[in-house]
Amino acid sequence: MKTELSLKIVNRAIALYYQLKTMTTTKTEYKYVHLDEKNVPIITGSTMKVVELITSVKAYSWTPEELQENYPHLSMSQIYSALAYYWDNQPEIDAEKLRREVGESPLVKRLKAEGVI
């Protein structure tokens, strides 16, 4: 029974590895930030979105050092790269974050339903 469970876990881990390996990503000019297939900025070498890191900065006023203490899987280079990406793309990232939190307006929903946009 224990061996079966271990084998299932290993097989799932292998499947996830190949799924992540084959995901389409786009490089950016930032060494530790890439865009996933939905154009969402991700910290390279992790599964963390840049906006998730920024949320911690805004919610807790964490410094880069405090971010590293709380996210020890990220290096300082990854953190600074993600912060630089955010600062250089702040209006777009903030607008996307707000859109996801609030959702689409009734007007946008209607225009999409009508095929206008």
Image: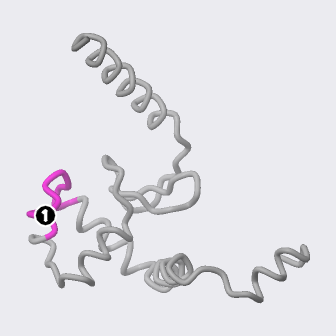
Q: Residues within 10 Å of mark 1 (few under 14, many from 20)?
A: few
Magenta extent: 67-77
- Residue 99 location (% of width, % of height): 56, 81
Q: Amino acid at mark 1?
A: Asn
Circle count: 1
Residue 27 belongs to the span the image colors magenta:
no
Q: Residue at position x 54%, y 84% from top?
A: 102
- When the figure is inspected, residue 47 is found, relative to residue 91, above or below; the finding is above
Residue 30, relative to residue 24: is it above or below? below
Secondary structure at numbered mark 1:
helix
Residue 57 or 107: which is nearer the viewer?
Answer: 107
**Is 91 on the left or on the right of 66, as rendered?**
right
Q: Nearer the viewer, residue 14 or 4?
A: 4
Question: In the depicted view, which residue is nearer to us: 39 or 116?
Answer: 116
Task: Name the residue at 33% across, 56% down.
Answer: 32
Residue 97, horizontal then vertical, whole percent: 48, 78
Q: In the visual, does 8 lie left or right of 74?
A: right
Mark 1 sits on what residue? 70
Identify the residue at horizontal 32%, vertical 74% (top origin): 84
Q: Judge whether 111 appears above or below 24 on screen.
A: below
Q: Residue 55's spot in the image, x, y percent?
A: 31, 76
